[in-house]
Amino acid sequence: MANLSAADILGAAKSKSAFSKPKAMKFNPLREENINDHIISLKYSPDQKWIAAAGISGKIHVFDAVSGRPAHSLNAHTFGVRMISWSRGGEFLTSAGQDGKIRLFETNGFSEIETLFAGSDWVECVRWSPHSDIFASAAGKKIRLWTANGELIHDYPDQLSTVVDLAWSPASDEFATACYGGLTRWRAETTVPLHKYQWKGSTLVIAWSPNGKYIATGDQDSTVHFWIVKSGKDLQMYGYPTKVKELSWDSSSRFLATGGGGAVTVWNCEPSPQGTLPMQLNGHQNYLSSLAFQPRGLLLLSGDLDGKISLWDIGRESQFQCSANLPGEITNIVWANDNTRFAVSDGDGTVRIYSIE
C-alpha cells in the first residue's frame, strides 16, 4: 500500500488563486420546481426525457427534462427513498426504500410493475447495469440480481457486514460491492466472487473509472483508495478533514475529483496517482456535498452544505469559472448528456435546471 500524507494533500500542492482570472462562463437559470421534501436522489434518464427526484418522505417526482415541468408523482415507499436508478435505455425506473422494498416502474406512463423484497428492512442501493437489462440491489448483508421484469436471477452469499455501495463495471457485466473489510467483484453469470480486495476499514462510496482500470473508494476514516482492478493492489490517500463521500471521474479517467472537506481535491491518475500531488480548488467555505464532472470534457461542478455551487475547468490554468449561492444545502448535481445543462437539488426540496454559457 502506498500512502500520501495530509501534508501532501493539503499543504504541498500550492494551487494558483482559484479566483485570479475568472472566465466568461456563467450559469443561466432555466427552471425551478419545489417538491416540499428533502431530495436525496436526483437522476436524468439515459434517453434524456425525464428527471426524477426522490424525497425522504418516500415520493418520487418526475419532471420533463426539456421544459422542467412536473410530469408524474409516484408514491414509492412508506418510508424514505434511499436511491433511484434508471435502466440503460430509460424504459424502467427503480427505487430503493427504507421500508425494505424495491419498486419497479415502467416509464411509459410510470405504472408500477413489481414490488420486490431485497432481503432486509433497509435497502441501501439499487443500480442498473449499463450493458444489460438487469439490476443489482444491496440490503443489509444481501446482494441480489434481478431481471427487468423483477424476476430474481441470483441471491448471492451473505456478506460479513452491511453492503454500503455497489457499482457496475463500465466495460462488462461485472459489479463491485463494498462492506467493512474491503471490496468484492462479481460476475452477473455466477454467484462465485471474481476477486476480493481486502482492507480493514469502512468504505462509504464506490466510483469505477470509465476506462475500467481503477475502482476508487471514499472511506469513513477520511481516506481515498485507488484499487487497481487487474492486480488488486491499492493506493491510499489520507489526511482529508472529514470522511470522503464525494467522488467523480472525468470521462477520460485521467482525473478523479474528491470531497472530504471544503476544498475540491483532484488527482491526476495518468498513468498513476502514485507519487503525484493533487490540485486543490479552493472556493467553498463549508464542506462539499456533491461533485460531478460533465459527461464529456473537463468541466467540474461542486456543491456544498451552505448551498453554493461552483464551476471549474480542470483543463485551464485558471480553473474557477463561476458560482451561485442557493438557499439550501446542495444534495445532488447531475449533468444532462448535452454537456451544457445540469440539474441541482437542495435540502429545501427545490430542483433547479441550468445551462452553461
Image (spheres, helix red, strand yellow):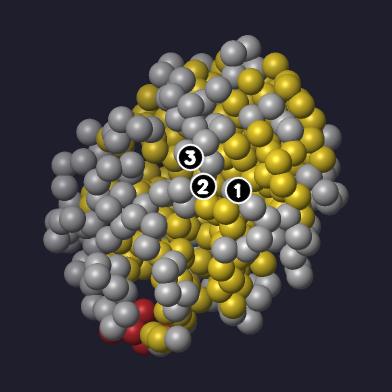
What is the distance, in whole Å, between disc 3 and disc 1 at their CAs? 15 Å
Mark 1 or mark 2: name the one nearer the start of the chain.
2
Residue 288, how many percent across, how many down? 48, 59
Q: Which disc number belongs to residue 130?
A: 3
* Relative vertical location of residue 79 with respect to residue 104 in this rendering, above or below: below
Residue 108, how many percent across, how many down? 59, 13
Q: Quadrant of the N terminus?
A: bottom left
Q: Are marks 3 and 1 in contact (CB under 8 Å)?
A: no
Q: Is residue 100 visible?
A: yes
* Relative vertical location of residue 108 with respect to residue 167 in this rendering, above or below: above
Q: Which disc number belongs to residue 189?
A: 1
Residue beneath the point at 25% across and 39% down: 26
**What SS does tag 1 mark?**
loop
Taking the image as shown, residue 168 lies to the left or right of residue 309, namely: right
Q: Nearer the viewer, mark 2 or mark 3?
A: 2
**What SS does tag 3 mark?**
loop
Mark 3 or mark 1: name the one nearer the start of the chain.
3
